Amino acid sequence: MSTRRKKFSLLLTSLMALTLSVSACGGNNADNNKATGSAGSEKPVELIWYTIGAPQKDVDQVMAEVNKYTKEKINATVKMKMIDYGDYSQKMQVNAASGEPMDIMFTSSWAFDYVQNARKGAFMQIDDLLQTQGKDIVATLDPAFLEGSKVDGHNYGVPANKELPAQEVWRFNKEFLDKYDLDISKVNTMESLIPLLKTIKEKEPNITPYAMINDFVPFMPFDYIIEKLPMAVYMGTKDYKVVNILETPELKEMLKTVRTFYKEGYISPEVSTITSVDDLNRSGKWFADRAPTQPFADNLWSSSLGYPIVSIPAGEPIIYNWSVMGSMQAISANSKYPEKAMEFLNLLNTDPVLRNMVDSGIEGVHYEKVSDNVMKNMDNSKNYDMPTFSLGNVLITYLNEGDPENKWDEFKKFNESGINAPLLGFNFDTSKVTSEIASVQNVKEEYWSALMTGTVDPDEYLPKAIEKFKAAGLDKVIAEAQRQIDEWKAATGK
């Protein structure tokens, strides 16, 4: 099994960062009415499904087998069209604008933006469909998935059943923990890392004590209005007051710590220009970093990198909007067959036979079963290597050889442990402050990375950054966000 296909959206989206109106159709057309029901005398419906990932050689071969199954089950066939990661958002915007025939499409917080396109009319509102053709999805998903993916009070997409919360961990190269008998049990803040980093700096001059990249943001108790812009509410907020995080004591204290990391050489002196530490990770010449986790992530990292990795929680598992929206399937607003599309999504997310066929290909061609729920790839699997996270319910996919038997049970426990972020279900409408946000983004480009990575002295540069952000209109953006949050809070009874 390629490690790439079995990595899930939380780990992927952490690497990714975080338009035009289409007239909605009610779907009560004659074609759709003719196509309802299971296989019978009526002509089967063909659903067009756009999804993300490198196009696979054997897609058509696999879909032919899928279609035999879906025709029998729901009298529908599926034509899958794959678009590679780097092209997906742009090409899907063109498709939506031009009225390209589409029924189902992948969307997320990081590709073909879910909230933006729901508001622009690209997706069909599916509240009623979820209660009829999609009722098994509703029964299967943790309610936080559907609650957190509402846009202005309505659902426009089916989230993949996967890891629900986002949780950060401090991650360590075990070789150096063992070599110097270092204790990580007391590590709970960046500051508490300093004694360990000091040891590595002194004893291992060729090792980077802490692997950091230029878009690093210290771990702080905030739920951001827009990721990596300096406005947020506190995690434990009661009044939902939006703050400029640059003016908070937590940020000021954290910048002092990161500055210490920089001055003491615990991070690379070129950190403000480093966009990836993949090569450093592969080389094993690093000691610690921070990363998003999921159940058995240590095993995944150790297998992928080829040496032992261990981790310890840096924070609680929190359910954010962006973690809920990491992988979704929407129904096109101009789909001729919205009910049938929801029937297919319902089957895809609840039927292990269909889900695993779409995910792993044809048994005996691309994979073979080791036991009822365990598989291993065959040589032909390289012709059908799909991104598991993007295709629907991950928790009903087969295990790979070597996976723990309780893997999906642990995912369920992880999901149940999630704590709702205060702004879960709120999505900021930026239309009234578009120019101010553009100006704020420009200031961010100038100051953010240098401050957050400790490259500059915060005592000197933080006041300058605050002044520049205010001049760019940050206070107006915060005021608009506060107005919308107050309305949302009143409407939802928060």
Image: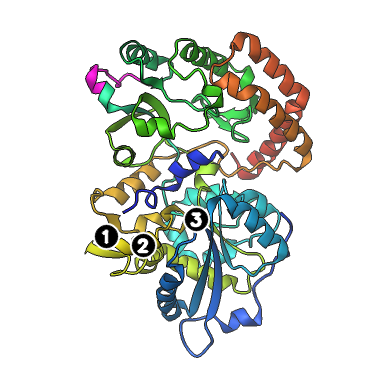
- The residue that appears at 56% across and 21% down in the rendered structure is 452
- Neighbourhood count class around disc 2 (C-alpha, 10 Å): few under 14, some 14–19, many 20 upward: many
Q: Which residue is mark 1?
A: 375
Proximity of marks 3 and 2: CB atoms separated by less than 8 Å = no
Looking at the picture, which amino acid does disc 3 mark?
Gly
Given residues 140 and 99, the one toward you in this image is 99
Q: Which residue is mark 3?
A: 53
State the image coordinates of residue 167 (x, y, percent, origin top left). Answer: 42, 35
Q: Give the mark, 3 or 2, whose residue is nearer the N terminus.
A: 3
Q: Give the mark, 1 or 2, whose residue is nearer the N terminus.
A: 2
User: From the image, which quarter does the N terminus lie in?
Assistant: bottom left
Given residues 244 and 3, the one toward you in this image is 3
User: Would residue 272 be seen by someone viewing this image from the given angle?
Assistant: yes
Label 3: element kind: loop
Q: Is residue 377 left or right of residue 455?
A: left
State the image coordinates of residue 418 (x, y, percent, origin top left). Answer: 42, 40
Proximity of marks 1 and 2: CB atoms separated by less than 8 Å = yes
Range of residues picked out in magenta: 177-188
Residue 360: mark in rendering: 2
- The residue that appears at 52% across and 21% down in the rendered structure is 270
